Amino acid sequence: MSSRYRLCQIMGKGHLLALTVEQSG
């Protein structure tokens, strides 16, 4: 259960980072 929650967090962070990079670029 913990691993699944962490995976969601990592995915969310990655998505946010990608969005920021796209906006910045």
Image: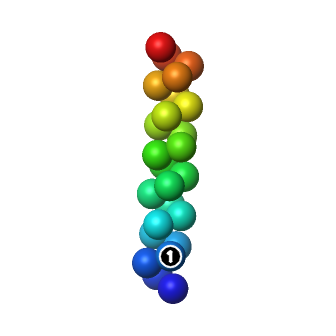
Quadrant assignment, res 10: bottom left
Residue at figure coordinates x 46%, y 46% from the top left: 14
Reply above or below: 23 against 19. Answer: above
Query: Dot 1: what SS?
Result: helix
Asked which colour scheme the image uses, the reply is rainbow
Reply above or below: 2 against 24. Answer: below
- x and y, in percent, of residue 13 in the image: 48, 48
Label 1: which residue?
Answer: 4
In the image, farthest residue toward the bottom: 1
Residue at figure coordinates x 50%, y 60% from the top left: 9
Number of marks: 1
Number of other residues with Cα within 10 Å of mark 1, as a class: few under 14, some 14 to 19, many 20 or more: few
Residue at figure coordinates x 55%, y 31% from the top left: 19
- x and y, in percent, of residue 6 in the image: 45, 69
Reply above or below: 20 against 16. Answer: above
For badge 1, the amino acid type reads: Arg
- x and y, in percent, of residue 25 in the image: 47, 14
